[in-house]
Image (cartoon, helix red, strand yellow):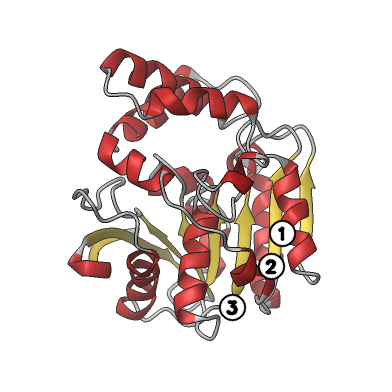
Amino acid sequence: MRSQTVIGGGGLKLNVEDGGNPHGKTILFIHGFSQCHLVWHKQIHSGLARDFRLVTMDIRGHGLSEKPCGVYGDSKLWADDVHEVIATLGLKNPLLVGWSYAGAIMCDYIACYGEADIAGTNWVAAVSAPMRALSQRAFLGADFLSVVPGLLSRNAQESLESMQAFVRLCKHAEISPEELYLTLGYGLSVPLHVRIGLLSRELNNDDVISKIRKPMLLSYGDHDAVVSLSMARHIMSLVKHAKLSVYHGIGHSPFWEASRRFNRELRELRNAT
């Protein structure tokens, strides 16, 4: 993977990793809340790299991207980030793969730029809007909602304990100590003002989603403690051509917990678009 800086919305510097087959169809991976590009390890270091160009980005405020204050509430900025990655790297009709919070980011992009420059979307345990919207709370797990106040706390110990609980909630099975400390590390590297900015956005993207015409694959685990399977059902009620892939016994991270199946289905989707 080759690291480079892309200037996103409002001049913010974004870290982008570009690799795989430069002549293959492109897949653009967008991670979720308090994560980073490293979550896609099992896709980047897989057979997908032989056939597809694989691009990952650290969303604003995360990973190696810039983390200024006050730049997380404007949908146009989020949309510009994705647009500039596509334009700067010359990505031709990439398939957008959005995990968790990235569902809202994909909506930001589509609302501002439409679907002309993308091949389709893969919604991976994704939400259609940030949790501040009252309608979203019905689609979120009770255990996740219980740790949110701690994630937004200025008390260091409470923040640490809540982030550790959140990291564990992202997988159904118990994770290894190595994985725990890796994910805890990049989770805690996201400043408090960024976490507050992401979770306080007020949006309802049902109208945006209902107008999507490109292929949509919904990849959701039925043991997800963060985003309920009802979120996928809701999206399907808005987009009749969307296809749902339910991962039985899997939690919030099907791309990690069931990577072989996820990669196979992602390959099929990308080949078909």
Q: Nearer the viewer, residue 207 or 233?
A: 207
Image position of 165 (left or right of 121): left
**Which comes sooner in the sequence, label 1 or label 3?**
3
Image position of 232 (left or right of 66): right
Of tags 2 and 1, the one toward the viewer is: 1
Question: How many residues crowd around disc 2 within 10 Å: few (fewer than 14), some, or many (20 or more)?
Answer: many
Percent of width and height locating residue 104: 51, 57
Of tags 2 and 3, the one toward the viewer is: 2
Farthest top residue?
A: 157
Q: Amino acid at mark 3?
A: Ala
Tell me if label 2 and label 1 are in contact, CB under 8 Å. Answer: yes
Q: Residue at x 39, y 39 (%)?
A: 34
Q: Say which mark, if any, is on residue 119.
A: 3
**Which comes sooner in the sequence, label 2 or label 3?**
3
Question: How many residues crowd around disc 1 within 10 Å: few (fewer than 14), some, or many (20 or more)?
Answer: many
What residue did someone put label 2 on? 216
Spatial CA distance of label 1 from label 3 is: 18 Å
What residue did someone put label 1 on? 235
Percent of width and height locating residue 66: 21, 52
Q: Say which mark, if any, is on residue 212.
A: none
Tell me if label 2 and label 3 are in contact, CB under 8 Å. Answer: no
Q: Residue at x 55, y 29 (%)?
A: 145
Tell me if label 1 and label 3 are in contact, CB under 8 Å. Answer: no
Visible in this render: residue 110? yes
